[in-house]
Amino acid sequence: MDAEKLILELEQLLPKKSRLEEFLLSKLEEHFENPDKAKSKSYQSWIDELLGGPEQLRLQPAPPMPVGFPVNLMGVRYGQPKYALNEQGELIGLNLAALGLRNEQWEGIVKVLRRHDVRLRALNLSENHLTRLTPPPNVEALEVLDVSGNELEDVPVDVKKAGNEAILHWLQSKDKRPILEAKVMFIGDSEVGKTHLVEMLIHGKLTREITTTHGIELNQLKPAKSSEGDIRLNVWDLGGQHFMRSTHQFFFTERTLYVLVTVARTERQDLNYWLELVQKLGGGAPVLIAINKTDLDTHDLDRAALQRDYPNIVGFVRTAVYDNAGKDVNALETIEALQNEIHKLVSDKALMPGVFQLQRREWFDIKSALEGMESDFITYERYLELEGVKGLPEDEASTFLKQMSWLGTVVSFVDDPRLMDTHVINPRWLMDGVYGILNDPEIKERKKGCFAFDDLSRIFDQRRYPRARYNFLVGLMERFRLCYPARGTKNTFLIPTLFPDAEPEGVWDVENPMRFRLDYKQYPPDLFMTQFIVDHYQQIEDDKVWRSGVIIKDGNGCQALVRQSFRFNQIEIEVDGPENLRRSFLYNIITSFDKLHEPYEKLKVTRELPYKDHWLNFDHLIKYEQHNQPYFHPELGENIPVKEVLDGYRPTSIAERDDILKRMDQLEDNLHRRHDQTQEQLDHLLESQDGVKRILQNLEGGKIGEQQQREVMEEMMQVIKELAKQGKLQKSQVQEIENAPDLKSQFVLSIPLIPTILSYQTSFAWDWAKFRKKLCRIMT
């Protein structure tokens, strides 16, 4: 290989400097929203200095560094491409990051690399405009890859989320094939005919007497045809009873086709519940609405209005399971129309890309192993030891597991911080167990949600649910916030969703309580109310609790009523007690609900407080205060005293803290302005090997104490691990640092990585300014 000739050939394919300038200016707008004139001018000056000279970009050799290849190559420098050669003069590394490369430019570079039979070991294509990832020749030789900051469309979403290492493994796999499998979930209120429709789809007729579905039924529909092959359809028939809503959160997933079964004259609010659930828990997955029982009712839904509010509704179909000649309804024809619509939707690559996602052979091996496991559940640690999983990076292993959950192969909760360390579970075992308890007439009707282990012995087949597994099953229900232990008893539990509906008379008789409310708009907050009861069961006052409300106390003389308003989808909070203490109690209650909302990224909850018979948006008031803006209320015809209103709701400690933080911010701003020039010089030095040498000299000279070493080292390790996770540093480097015999040795091994670390500041969120200041202190 003539390296010099190859480098010249590659340079001809790089963007011209005029095009690169456009790219760099676009990055200014990405990093700084509405940059001021001074910042824009400074940025333009930097670009002019960077791009001075000839129009053609030049590839520069990777700078020599103590840590060597590939670290010296992979750091990102806008508009500064690099290359690396081995001792034989062969090209082994390319850094084409932050150049604004497009597909055709990269594909042209790949052709040149292929013609010269190049075997790259390291490649950085981050921060470009690539949508296709064409692999370089001899991709099996590639050890380090960085493609972050590109909108890649041909790499599976889950693989991209798992990071650069997973993308590299996926790219190197030679036997990828499409999944060709989908989950179809039938949802809707009780008694709308979901199970009848599934039965007709499977058998073409009703083969059994069908009663209310108590939980979820799992089956398979007739495969759908596609250009890639037959698509396996796993159908889930979800029970729609109101008391089961607290369990729905665990079975709604992305990559699913939802068939919402309803009847023509359904209340819009009932439809909204299911559509909102798909939006918030199903990631806005496609919804097909089946308007059922058309043999009884010829009316229709307001389709246009529904699709305006929920764009993920992809179609409507009218269905019936019984003929009605008088209304010209042929049941089998409607079932065939439903089947055709399902098949059309799941075979649409644009609508259901997950069905056609290419996966490696290992993925299918793991799926077969999980489907064939004899145990009803295994620990997550045991899953990591399965053949095919063992040896995978943990991010990739958890991504595989998440995909299995989407298909319904297993139930796992790798994305839920509350449950991620629970087991990998056979979905049928879990559902039969939980719903067996929830649907037991004795527990549901007579005991009103109270059950003991003796009840489980009565309900379950001891071969499938031996007494030794009761703790595990009930423990899962506790972690799902479905139940909590009863006071003063052993192995007895209470299920709030089965509590009596009615609020007890005289349970709350308080004058002038502090009031607050949470408005969920179209989404019924049943789930959050029952979860709140479970979270605060130890604070419940004298068993004053019902399905939609509770009285709790804090031990400091405060008590609170927390209840659900069904009419307006709101949760009302009233607090009584000493003035400042009740403010703190209210603050804790609001914080508790905020935590319950965290897993629901698309959920919008309006927090409100009362003022002169009007309800004001709490978060809007905070913004008015932060920006020191007046708030004129048109209905009241007056300016709202924002600070005074908020201070009436903030605990004193919070208000004092906010005031102190505000003054500290002002002081820090002043210090920043005074020391900008000095800091800029130090920052520049930090990014060079001279800065590294100075730190090491200070260390040897005893100028950096052990405590200072420890503080810097703790933060350094967090950054280093994150970069290794993204594939920007080799994991062997991290292990070498972690295995160092003492703190000083760790420090010596880490310091040479500083220039590389700082070159990746755009890779992830971090308080980089604070980190650089710490480094500057040990340098000076």
Image: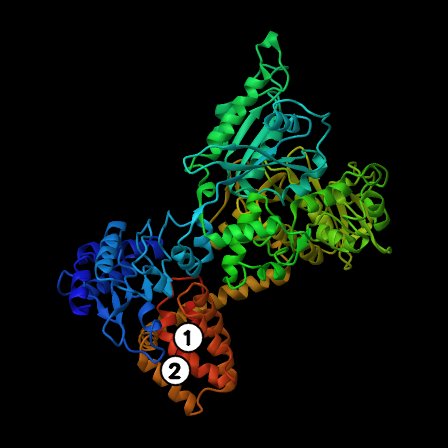
Secondary structure under tag 2 reads helix
Question: Could you say where residue 516 lies in the image, as x and y percent from the top left?
Answer: 65, 46
The residue positioned farthest toward the top in the image shown: 326
Question: Could you say where residue 10 lies in the image, as x and y percent from the top left?
Answer: 20, 61
Q: Are marks 1 and 2 in contact (CB under 8 Å)?
A: no
Q: Can see residue 665? A: yes
* Residue closer to the observer: 594 or 494: 494
Location of the N terminus by quadrant is bottom left
Question: Could you say where residue 145 lies in the image, as x and y percent from the top left?
Answer: 36, 62
Q: Quadrant of residue 212?
A: top right
Q: Can see residue 628? A: no
Secondary structure under tag 1 reads helix
Please give the residue where the numbered disc 2 appears in the rendered image.
779
From this view, report whether residue 762 is shown above or below residue 209: below
| Amino acid beneath label 1 | Lys
Q: Judge from the rendering whether residue 30 lies leftward or rightward of residue 521; answer left or right.
A: left
| Amino acid beneath label 2 | Met
From this view, report whether residue 142 is shown above or below residue 177: below
Location of the C terminus by quadrant is bottom left
Q: Quadrant of residue 608?
A: top right
Q: Which mark is residue 773?
A: 1
Q: Residue at x 62, y 11 (%)?
A: 324
* Residue closer to the observer: 523 or 394: 394
Density class for disc 1 (Cα within 10 Å; few <14, some 14-19, many ≥20) is: some
From this view, report whether residue 270 is shown above or below residue 73: above
* Cα–Cα span, label 1 and label 2: 10 Å
Density class for disc 2 (Cα within 10 Å; few <14, some 14-19, many ≥20) is: many
Q: Residue at x 49, y 66 (%)?
A: 663
Mark 1 or 2 closer to N-term? Answer: 1
Q: Judge from the rendering whether residue 330 lies leftward or rightward of residue 464; answer left or right.
A: left
Question: Could you say where residue 699 lies in the image, as x and y percent from the top left?
Answer: 43, 88
Q: Judge from the rendering whether residue 258 lies leftward or rightward of residue 10; answer left or right.
A: right
